[in-house]
């Protein structure tokens, strides 16, 4: 089911969606994300599987909606992370430090949200989620470009918002933004996958990425 301006989101629809999401979260807590099936969600909600497909296109759609709450701790911690930053470069480092801390300690969720095999569909599902459950931010605590970043559904786009502010203040060149962005995201993904597979523990992954992040930025600022 597609959620758009032509398909009115009634309170009943929203409640049904939330109910299926709550059942999915319960299964994830008790059995893990890989254990979720449409049948289990149907049994938990005391509905039939066909009813779930009236609200979600497939299992990935349902899981993405259900794990979006996992980003809340990171989002709520961001103002604390950036409050003492003196310039956009310090903000850039602080945002990444915060993101890494939460994502490398919750790898299955961040892998599913940002590096699924269905990346295009996942981005679309995240956009749908925010249409139904908009981010409730105290915007006085977040710079405009951070708000734009948080509302973006695609990880390559999210990082561009904070890099652009570094360009405005002369820390990096505009011509280098996409190279920096690609290098950072590929590095982030590579370490995330190794932490997720157990080849690195989370703290080692955090330390490694933060070291590489600063070396990469230093190389473009010389």
Image (spheres, rainbow, N blue to C red):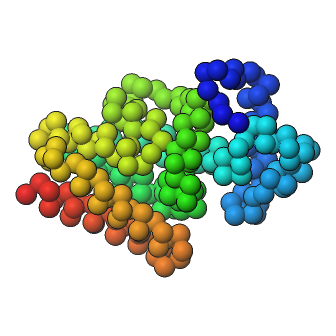
Q: How many marks?
A: 0
Q: Is residue 25 visible?
A: no
Q: Quadrant of residue 78?
A: top left
Q: Residue furthest bottom?
A: 199
Residue drawn at x 42%, y 26% as measured from the top left: 139
Where residue 53 appears, as percent x and y from the top left, is: 78, 42
Residue drawn at x 48%, y 69% as measured from the top left: 193
Would you place residue 198 above or below residue 68 in this image? below
Would you place residue 123 above or below residue 127 in this image? below
The quadrant in which the N terminus is found is top right
Q: Is residue 52 left or right of residue 112?
A: right
Instruction: Compare residues 22 and 64 and report the one nearer the observer.
Output: 64
Where residue 92 appears, as percent x and y from the top left, is: 28, 46
Residue drawn at x 29%, y 60% as measured from the top left: 183
Where residue 59 appears, as percent x and y from the top left, is: 71, 52
The quadrant in which the C terminus is found is bottom left
Would you place residue 167 above or below residue 156 in this image? above
Q: Is residue 21 left or right of residue 182?
A: right
Instruction: Compare residues 2 and 209 and report the one nearer the observer.
Output: 2
Where residue 4 appears, as percent x and y from the top left, is: 61, 26
Instruction: Compare residues 78 and 40 and report the one nearer the observer.
Output: 40
Q: Is residue 196 visible?
A: yes
Would you place residue 80 above or below residue 25 in this image? above
Q: Is residue 15 left or right of residue 111?
A: right
Residue drawn at x 53%, y 69% as measured from the top left: 196
């Amino acid at each position: 089911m597609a959620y758009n301006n032509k398909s009115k989101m009634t309170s009943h629809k929203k409640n049904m969606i939330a109910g299926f999401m709550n059942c999915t979260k319960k299964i994830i807590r008790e059995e893990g994300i890989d254990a979720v099936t449409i049948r289990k969600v149907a049994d938990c909600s005391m509905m039939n599987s066909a009813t779930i497909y009236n609200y979600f296109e497939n299992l990935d759609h349902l899981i993405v909606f259900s794990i979006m709450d996992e980003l809340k701790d990171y989002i709520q911690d961001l103002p604390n992370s950036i409050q003492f930053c003196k310039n956009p470069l310090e903000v850039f480092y602080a945002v990444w430090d915060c993101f890494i801390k939460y994502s490398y300690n919750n790898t299955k969720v961040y892998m599913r949200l940002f590096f699924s095999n269905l990346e295009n569909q996942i981005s679309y599902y995240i956009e749908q989620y925010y249409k139904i459950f908009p981010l409730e931010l105290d915007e006085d605590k977040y710079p405009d470009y951070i708000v734009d970043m948080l509302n973006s559904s695609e990880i390559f786009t999210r990082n561009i918002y904070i890099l652009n502010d570094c360009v405005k203040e002369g820390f990096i060149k505009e011509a280098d933004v996409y190279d920096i962005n690609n290098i950072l995201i590929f590095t982030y993904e590579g370490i995330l996958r190794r932490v997720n597979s157990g080849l690195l523990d989370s703290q080692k992954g955090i330390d490694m990425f933060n070291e590489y992040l600063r070396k990469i930025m230093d190389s473009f600022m010389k």
